[in-house]
Image (cartoon, rainbow, N blue to C red):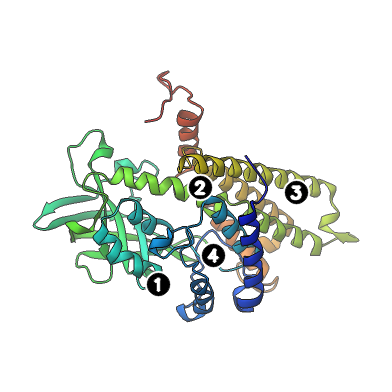
């Protein structure tokens, strides 16, 4: 494991800092960071940044070059994401670029690649993910949404929940049960994609979260027809395809990126140094400084686990089950940092509006509410711990069976 940048990584880091400094408009830099995509910007406001990325071939940096990407390996992607957050650029999480695009590259047919990849790359179509259901979240294999055979395709019936960005999406990709009798239950699932704006039988209901933000939705499927040529990776093969996607998602998730934690720590230290206390500031409290040092060491632990997984991917092409560590450890660490920040801010941390404390405190109050979901969304911390216990540490389960990988 080499913790230093390779020459290629160092060159990429220097190049990114230069074009962020020189070419990105000031209005798109030094923005508050979030694990969620920044949906406050219009397409017109995004355009200058997308133009810079397009000019440098970085619209989809991890995609192979034949499909319009830059062909970045995992080390280069870590540098790319670190410098993006360091520059304070708006959080840019795209289900098309980050998830379904790579899935189509890996498991899609040639016709599907030709049909969808160019339009995903140029943001002509925006995708959202339909996985979780009211009765199947972390235990996703228990999903009950059905896709029954019909002439030329499937009729889909069911419900999804916590669907991020469905109200903004042009297309959706969903997991549905195409074989009701398959055992084990993972074997009867398929991954299907469909036009969310022009398909009959598909409706969306918004979910406004505790911070007042509309990012999540419920989606309903009532005899929605999906052609068979829009099944990705083959009928009844969706569980394998979805797990490839989820492993990389957990490794690349912002909650596992120590640069994001460093940004949150920087916000905490800024407040502590500015907030008056007695004859000085809150920063003068040695107990607080000890807590911050411990948090900084925890961030370093996350960084070195990330380096180890980077080495694993370089050797095998797969992050492995260790990727679950990023989800629960990174999420819990972010919660700890934000909770410490709220403690420092005192009454300002519950200031729901900008007045009288200011916009930074308003953003902190909403971040403190939102962070409760960091260990739930995308697979709960409890489930991720079970995965690590069984498949990484090989611990026995309650029956005493060895925890071999399934």
**Residue indicated by mark 3:** 292
Q: Which residue is depicted at the point 39% across and 56% down?
A: 102
* Mark 2 vs 4, N-terminal side: 4
* Mark 4 vs 3, N-terminal side: 4
Q: Give the image location of residue 134, x and y in percent.
A: 33, 49
Q: Is mark 2 on a helix, strand or loop?
A: helix
Q: Which residue is depicted at the point 49% across and 33% down?
A: 388
Question: In whole angstroms, how far apart are the C-alphas of marks 1 and 4?
Answer: 18 Å
Image quadrant where one finds the C terminus: top left
Residue 358 picture quarter: bottom right
Question: In whole angstroms, how far apart are the C-alphas of marks 1 and 3?
Answer: 42 Å
Question: Which is closer to the viewer, label 1 or label 3?
Answer: 1
Q: What element carries label 3?
A: helix
Q: Is residue 97 left or right of residue 4?
A: left
**Residue indicated by mark 4:** 91
**Residue indicated by mark 1:** 122
Question: Which is closer to the viewer, label 2 or label 3?
Answer: 2
Question: Which is closer to the viewer, label 1 or label 4?
Answer: 1
Question: In whole angstroms, how far apart are the C-alphas of marks 2 and 1?
Answer: 25 Å
Q: What element carries label 1?
A: loop
The image's mark for residue 251 is: 2
* Mark 2 vs 3, N-terminal side: 2
Q: In this view, does 240 lie above or below 52?
A: above
Question: Which is closer to the viewer, label 4 or label 3?
Answer: 4
Farthest residue toward the top? 400
């Amino acid at each position: 494991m080499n913790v230093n940048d390779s020459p290629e990584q160092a060159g990429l880091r220097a190049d990114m800092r230069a074009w962020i400094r020189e070419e990105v408009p000031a209005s798109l830099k030094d923005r508050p960071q979030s694990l969620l995509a920044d949906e406050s910007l219009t397409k017109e406001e995004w355009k200058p940044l997308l133009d810079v990325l397009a000019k440098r071939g970085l619209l989809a940096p991890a995609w192979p070059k034949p499909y319009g990407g830059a062909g970045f390996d995992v080390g280069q992607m870590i540098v790319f994401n670190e410098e993006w957050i360091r520059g304070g650029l708006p959080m840019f999480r795209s289900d098309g670029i980050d998830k379904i695009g790579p899935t189509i590259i890996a498991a899609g047919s040639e016709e599907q690649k030709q049909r969808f990849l160019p339009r995903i790359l140029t943001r002509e179509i925006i995708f959202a993910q339909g996985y979780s259901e009211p009765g199947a979240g972390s235990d996703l294999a228990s999903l009950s949404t059905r896709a029954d055979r019909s002439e030329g395709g499937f009729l889909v019936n069911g419900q999804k929940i916590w669907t991020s960005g469905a109200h903004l999406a042009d297309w959706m990709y969903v997991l549905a049960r195409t074989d009701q009798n398959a055992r084990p239950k993972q074997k009867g699932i398929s991954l299907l994609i469909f036009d969310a704006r022009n398909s009959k039988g598909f409706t969306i209901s918004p979910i406004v979260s505790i911070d007042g933000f509309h990012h999540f939705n419920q989606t309903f499927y009532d005899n929605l027809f999906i052609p068979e040529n829009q099944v990705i990776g083959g009928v009844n093969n969706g569980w394998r395809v979805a797990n490839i996607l989820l492993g990389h998602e957990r490794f690349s998730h912002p909650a596992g990126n120590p640069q994001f934690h460093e940004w949150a720590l920087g916000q905490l230290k800024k407040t502590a140094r500015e907030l008056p206390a007695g004859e000085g500031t809150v920063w003068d409290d040695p107990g607080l400084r000890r807590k911050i040092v411990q948090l900084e060491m925890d961030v370093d632990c996350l960084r070195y686990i990330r380096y180890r997984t980077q080495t694993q991917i370089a050797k095998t092409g797969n992050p492995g089950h260790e990727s679950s560590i990023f989800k629960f450890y990174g999420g819990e660490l972010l919660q700890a940092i934000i909770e410490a920040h709220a403690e420092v801010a005192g009454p300002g941390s519950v200031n729901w509006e900008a007045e009288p404390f200011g916009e930074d405190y308003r953003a902190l109050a909403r971040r403190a509410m939102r962070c409760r979901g960091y260990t739930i969304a995308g697979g709960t911390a409890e489930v991720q711990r079970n995965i690590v216990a069984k498949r990484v540490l090989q611990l026995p389960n309650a029956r005493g069976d060895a925890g071999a990988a399934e």
